[in-house]
Amino acid sequence: MRVKNHKLVGADGRNVPFLQTPNGGDPLTGDKPRFLVIHYTAGGSLSGAVEWFRNPDAKASAHLNIGQDGAIVQMQTFDKICWHAGKSRWRNVKGLNSHSVGIEVVNWGLLKKSGSGGWLSHTNKPVPNDRVIMAPHKNSPGADQGWEAFEHEQYMATVAAAQALVAEYGILPGDLVGHDDISPLRKVDPGPAWDMEKFRALVFGRDQDEWDDLLYKVNSNTGLNMRAGPGTEHEIIKNLADGTVVHVIENVGNWWLVAEVVDGDDDVTGYVHRHWLQPK
């Protein structure tokens, strides 16, 4: 992908679909973005997000919206303001709407428990257990909460879009942030289900091949529960300490069948959620 005339051009050489939002439109400070802000939509579909941002009553908008399948819709040129950040601050800059591009990734975000023990969105839409990540939020450490997982296709589409923006506008690694970084008392998106450390590494040039090896390590300060089956409803076999090396045997959606590596050999086998693994 690349940026031409402040619009995103896809790998096929054509501009991604563009549907103008009425919300915003004034020039960015300096006519180009300094920051890139990642959000989740708190919704379940790309069409729903686009429809909402085309509604003047929403009083909200984003430059890019990225669906679960990786489809992208642009709604404002990158030299103009969208209303995505609200009251915000980063690197002593206040009001990031005037200084940033906003990317909304389709995802329900923070979930709630149903009466039957499953998971619901804030609109009471059921979310399958294999799409749920349990984790505390970095801005309010404590008990684990449920979050909808992001799809690999949309994650990598966001990487590609961010790479194009970084190349065009010279955005620095420390200026690629989440909404929960710039508005920590108000917002929780994109939340712990979005691997921001890995995202920055991919955007700023780490070789993608490094992420395809079969050996991974646990990346969680509280360890990672290995379960008897692919989902939180299954029995915990053991807790794998932070840094534990595992061999990936099989992918089952967001759950991976892995074997703990001990002295170079496979040991205990079970299922873990892929979000808490990173390449060794």
Image (spheres, grey):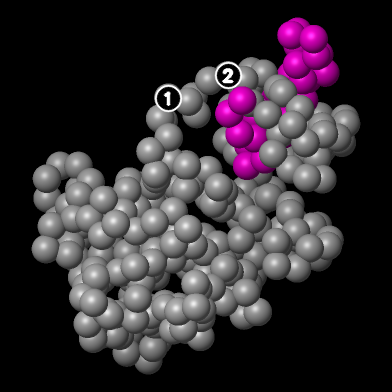
Vertical comparison of 70 with 258: above or below: below
Count neighbours of disc 2 (C-alpha within 10 A) and say few if under 14, some if 14 to 19, many if 20 or more.
some
Q: Secondary structure at mark 2?
A: loop
Which residue matches tag 1? Answer: 209
Q: Is residue 68 visible?
A: no
Residue 237 in picture, x, y percent from top left? 87, 30
Q: Position of residue 180 (x, y in %)?
A: 58, 69
* SS of the residue under disc 1: helix
Q: Which residue is mark 2?
A: 214
Query: What is the span of residues highlighted in magenta in the rendered image?
Result: 255-280
254 vs 170: above or below: above
Please name the amino acid that badge 2 sits on: Leu
The residue positioned farthest toward the bottom in the image shown: 57
Res. 92 visible in picture? yes
Relative placement, left or right, of 191 versus 88 is: right
The residue sitting at 54% across, 51% down in the picture is 196
